[in-house]
Structures are given as C-alpha cells and as structure tokens.
Image (tube, rainbow, N blue to C red):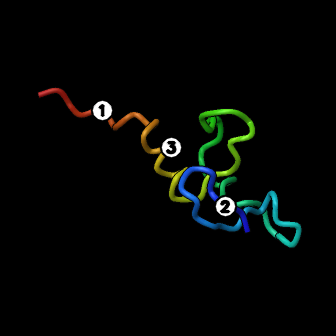
Amino acid sequence: MSVCSLCGATFQCGQLDPDATEPCWCIALPPAVPVPGSAAAGCWCPACLQEHIAALTPAAATPAK
C-alpha cells in the first residue's frame, strides 16, 4: 500500500507494489500532468490526482451568445 503525499489516504500503487500484476491505475489518466513540488513529493491517491487534473483541464468552450 502507498500513502498519498497530499491527503494521507492509502491506495494501491502498481509501480511501487512488488506484488502488482498490472500497471498502476494512474497509467489510464492523462500523461504530462506534473505533480507540484519536488520529485520527493511521492504519489497521489486517485481522488487527489483526478482532482488536480480536472483543475488543470480547461473547461469546454461555451458557445458565444
């Protein structure tokens, strides 16, 4: 088990778990979303990483009125 370096939640990390048989869940998320802070920041749980990605994703353009 891993611990989210942002909120402290525990989660399964396919990269760090020596018993993992499949890639980490984060592989399915958009790439190139850097985690703020240093490389020592550690992994974020699914909820924190998805929230961070959503905050960085521009909202769909609304049609002009």
- Tag 1: Cα neighbours inside 10 Å, few (<14), some, or many (≥20)? few
Q: Is residue 20 above or below residue 4?
A: below
Q: Which is nearer the eye, 58 or 36?
A: 36
Describe residue 41's horizontal placement relative to residue 19 as left or right. Answer: left
Q: Which is in the foreground here, disc 3 or disc 2?
A: 2
Image position, residue 2 (x, y; %): 71, 63
- Quadrant showing the N terminus: bottom right
Q: Residue at x 65, y 67 (%)?
A: 11
Element type at marker 1?
Answer: loop
Q: Cα distance, mark 3 to mark 1?
A: 17 Å
Image position, residue 55 (x, y; %): 42, 40
Q: Cα distance, mark 3 to mark 2?
A: 19 Å
Identity, as a three-letter code, of the amino acid under mark 2 = Val
Image position, residue 57 (x, y; %): 44, 37
Identity, as a three-letter code, of the amino acid under mark 3 = Ile
Identity, as a three-letter code, of the amino acid under mark 1 = Ala
Labels 3 and 1: the sequence-earlier one? 3
Instruction: Give the residue at mark 2.
Output: 3
Numbered label attached to residue 53? 3
Element type at marker 2?
Answer: strand
Q: Which residue is drawn at 66% across and 61% down?
A: 3
Of all residues, the one furthest to the top in this rendering is 64
Instruction: Give the residue at mark 1.
Output: 61
- Quadrant showing the C terminus: top left
Labels 3 and 2: the sequence-earlier one? 2
Element type at marker 3?
Answer: helix
Asked if disc 3 and disc 2 are in contact, CB closer than 8 Å, the reply is: no
Describe residue 63's horizontal placement relative to residue 44 as left or right. Answer: left
Q: Quadrant of residue 16?
A: bottom right
